[in-house]
Amino acid sequence: MKIKNDTIALSRLAKQSIIEFIKEERIQPDEQLPSEALLMDMMGVSRYTVREALALLEQDKIIYKVQGKGTFVKKVPVKIESGLEKLESITEIIKSFGYNPNGKCLKIEEITPTQDMIEKLKLNKEDKAITFTRIRTADEKIAAFCVDTVPKYLFKDEDIITLNNLSMFEYFSSKLGIHIEHAVAEIIPTFPTKEMVKLADVGSHELYILLRQIHYDNDGTPVIYSMDYFNPEVFKFKVNRIR
Amino acid sequence: MKIKNDTIALSRLAKQSIIEFIKEERIQPDEQLPSEALLMDMMGVSRYTVREALALLEQDKIIYKVQGKGTFVKKVPVKIESGLEKLESITEIIKSFGYNPNGKCLKIEEITPTQDMIEKLKLNKEDKAITFTRIRTADEKIAAFCVDTVPKYLFKDEDIITLNNLSMFEYFSSKLGIHIEHAVAEIIPTFPTKEMVKLADVGSHELYILLRQIHYDNDGTPVIYSMDYFNPEVFKFKVNRIR
DNA sequence: CAGTGGTCTAGACCACAAG
DNA sequence: TTGTGGTCTAGACCACTGC
């Protein structure tokens, strides 16, 4: 077993190599992997690289380690599906559920931000904001109703376009050079708002999941204040929880 | 700035040391930290240790790195302490909200597991299971209604006790030597079940958040199948989402 | 005791950003 | 070209496990 490459990190290759080894050797759940020293010899890499690879496998819940004993394959290697803790655009989520994502931008408004928006988006009192109200569909079914508020100063006027199929993340990345990497979401069970009933033809007694989120740039700048209402018949929200 | 210790990992000490440095030197948001080489000299440790410490700070969303430029303090160092992605017992969550946790065990039953339980808990067809139905309170307010199902083979008979104040996690850890480290939770908005209305005097039109969870031991064994209904007036569920 | 993973050091080369 | 972070190697000592 030898691995070599120029573009991909050795530790990634080592990880894949170990996965293949588990499959080929038919290592069963709870059985022991070769020791780090052995893996070093097998793959011809240093201990650092082996440990990096094992750390990646541990993150993926495929293996576990016990000091003094060894490294083992998990009984139930829970594959990380796209849990809520992984930040994805709604477009991406809809695709991952196997639906065809679509959408319509219902409204773009310049607003005076609320006190909460001013705090969360770190705005000055004079700053204005732009609100995008959109409806998202999955195979024609109503999937989500999104109200996203963004500080006005991020845009040049010509940047404000309608967002139909385009993901907000892609829009920010390609048009504004802003790369969203982190969000804090609050999960709130709720009924549809009056606006949803009026604009989106949603039954007023159906249950929805509201994700009240602040999205941050990689340098920590808050850039989007969003209120997204999800149809629980379309989305099954899961979270991987680690102690 | 020197750091030295015998019990705590050097990289942890280095992390704290860097945090203190940021405070003392009043390094402002978006300002640059000393380079890794400088930090090595300042703290008298190797580059590996410095990078470990910086990795911890990056996980905590306190700093960010840009290759070729340097390491910087985030604009808004967001650190949501108890996000849903962090697995905590309900007792711990209630405490972290500043309430006084309490509870009552309403029912302990031996049941024949459902097909879903058999699959998720990896049971054999003959296996029985034990269901614990409990109500949890925070400062006397109804906080959650918990129905936890556990394979019977995990218990010796004398182990089955009533769980009142005791956390399920502590119970497993101390009585059974099982350390729960991971769970997959599905988030479902719902109304109270008939059982909740009957046993817990809950209004049938109130909204609840159902967490449908499978809990895993550190070796990947599924050990608890739980259906926990949370009162959203007590719990504000947040999630840190990373791209 | 020997074998395992946990931590740390010292040194090297690379890719990227900015002058 | 210089300085930064990204990756990798080789070697060391420790703590824990099980014989």
Image (spheres, coloured by chain):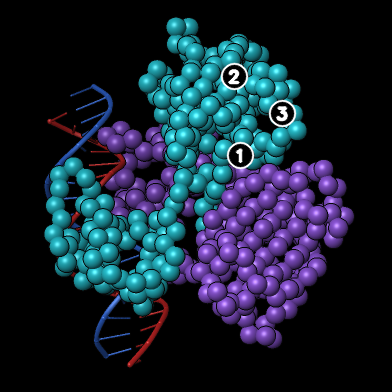
Chain colours: A cyan, B purple, C blue, D red
Q: Quadrant of residue A130?
A: top right
Q: Mark 1 points at which residue?
A: A233
Q: Does label 3 or label 2 sit earlier along the sequence?
A: 2
Q: Front-most of A206 and D9?
A: A206
Kindly indicate whether the residues beneath marks 3 and 2 are on one polypeptide chain.
yes
Inter-mark Cα distance, 3 to 2:
18 Å
Helix, strand or loop at mark 3: loop
* Residue B12 drawn above or below residue B168: above
Which three-letter amino acid code belongs to the residue tagged 2? Thr
Which three-letter amino acid code belongs to the residue tagged 3? Gly
User: Percent from the top left, x then y, of residue A89?
Assistant: 47, 32
Q: Mark 3 points at which residue?
A: A203
Helix, strand or loop at mark 2: strand
Left or right: A176 as drawn, with respect to B90: left
Residue located 59% across and 28% down the image: A142
Instruction: State how many labels appear.
Output: 3
Front disc: 2 or 1: 1
